[in-house]
Image (cartoon, rainbow, N blue to C red):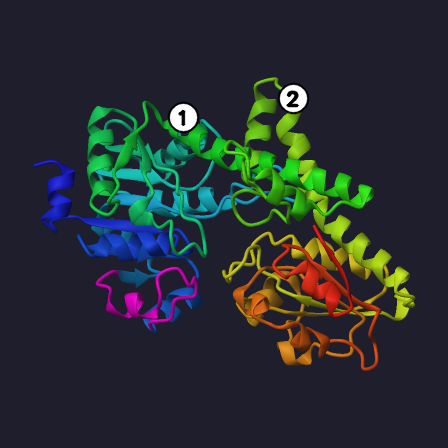
Amino acid sequence: MNLYNKIINREEKISIIGLGYVGMPLAIAFAEKVDVIGFDVNKEKVAMYHKGIDMTGEVGDEAIKNTTAVFCCDEERLKDAKLHIVAVPTPTNEDKTPDLRPVIGASKTLGRNLTEGSIVVYESTVYPGLTEEVCIPILEEESGLKCGVDFKIGYSPERINPGDKVHRLQNIVKVVSGMDEESLDIIAKVYELVVEVGVHRAESIKVAEASKIIENSQRDLNIAFMNEIAMIFDRMGIDTQSVIAAANTKWNFLLFEPGLVGGHCIGVDPYYLVHQAERFGHESKVIAAGRKVNDGMGKFVAEKTIKKLIKAGKNVSKAKIGILGLTFKANCPDIRNTKVIDIINELNEYGVEIKVTDCMADKEEVREEYGMELVDIEEIKDVDAIIVAVGHNQYKDLNFDRYREFFRVNSEEDRVLVDVKGILNKKEAEQYGYMYWRL
């Protein structure tokens, strides 16, 4: 009887290492079919899960309360599982090189508790070759076992889109790979338990790693193009959103919109590919250029805001700005690598007073991650400018009379309203007398 049969017969367990936006949906889905151990080093996070609170917002409190998955911080519990799925972040360092500490740490922890006959599957987004070149040696050293003899390895890139209620784990085709046919077959069958639309069996681990990293790099480049034309059209006095609406009437136009590109995937993964390309003697031009454009958008938005304040006759050094939204994307509590911080940092250079609110983000998490205090939306008042930085539904639903309440009393024609994602009606904003600008 192979490992797959033992898992579905509940003779062996699956472990999920890393219970964040990727790991938690995996744990909940697999627990409906098999026995699952969910492991995370963050004791506070695990404690919240034990209380039935979904910190990620991906599966909901009820799913966590009712799941049979066991959540723990005790690494020795990993010895009770035979198929391990590693779903930890892969961020970048300040110099934009890969920060492999999370995946290395997870590999060391797992290695200390790896048992003979196990299969390890990595889901973390990495550059081609990392699983075999970095992770396998760590697992072998920590466990004393030999890969290919005592345990096997595979890779299946995560495709979960935080905050997306349409494209979910169950209805996104899963790319899977294994070090040999046996491991590939077991890994594929295990994922088929929860992925309703099926899996794609990649021919190698490197192919699977590369497929994930180009998915995000391609999207990054397309957004970079739209960001660049937004800057060009801004100089020309042309509204980019109106241009996009016109161009999108053509059947083969690719609909991408300008904006801030942050988060744990699109704003990070291209740097992994650029890094690995350099190791092989290739200097990336297109991918690196796209990253440079996107990394500069926070500064661009901040500078446009300052210029609008000057045009409105405001004393910039005494100006007060309210920012609505801090998370890296709309309707999602994830603050990792948010580029709204770039807007804030640039505005701070001008000495303006800034207040930031977010209806989705956790205040304590923001305090720990960025050293800043979020305020309630009611505390945004008497401002000279509002920047709608994230397109949360709550901000879309605010009418322009409510937006007026944010500003100083008796300020009419000089109310600066910056709409980063273009979620508000431009004509209506101008009719209400706002000095409105959008990407």
Q: CA distance from mark 2 to mark 1?
A: 20 Å
Left or right: where 229 falls relative to 281:
right
Marks 1 and 2: in contact by CB < 8 Å? Answer: no
Crowd around label 2: few <14 · some 14–19 · many ≥20 (10 Å): some
Q: Is residue 99 above or below residue 131?
A: below
Q: Which comes before the other along the chain, label 2 or label 1?
A: 1
Magenta-colored segment: predominant secondary structure: loop
Residue behind mark 2:
283
Q: Is residue 135 above or below residue 307?
A: above
Q: Quadrant of residue 68?
A: bottom left
Residue sitting nearer the eye, 44 or 380:
380
Secondary element under disc 2, as helix, strand or loop, is loop
Q: Residue at x 15, y 39 (%)?
A: 3
Query: Percent position (x, y) of residue 148?
Result: 26, 27
Q: Residue at x 43, y 30 (%)?
A: 211
Secondary element under disc 1, as helix, strand or loop, is helix
Q: Is residue 66 located in the magenta-colored stretch of the structure?
A: yes
Q: Is residue 363 above or below residue 23?
A: below
Query: Percent position (x, y) of residue 435?
Result: 79, 63
Q: Amino acid at mark 2?
A: Glu
The residues colored magenta run 52-69
Q: Is residue 252 located in the magenta-colored stretch of the structure?
A: no
Q: Is residue 77 visible?
A: no
Checking the image for residue 206, the label placed there is 1
Q: Quadrant of residue 190?
A: top left
Q: Quadrant of residue 291?
A: top right
Q: Is residue 191 visible?
A: yes
Query: Percent position (x, y) of residue 239?
Result: 72, 47
Q: Amino acid at mark 1?
A: Lys
Q: Residue at x 38, y 41 (%)?
A: 123
Q: Is residue 327 above or below residue 157?
A: below
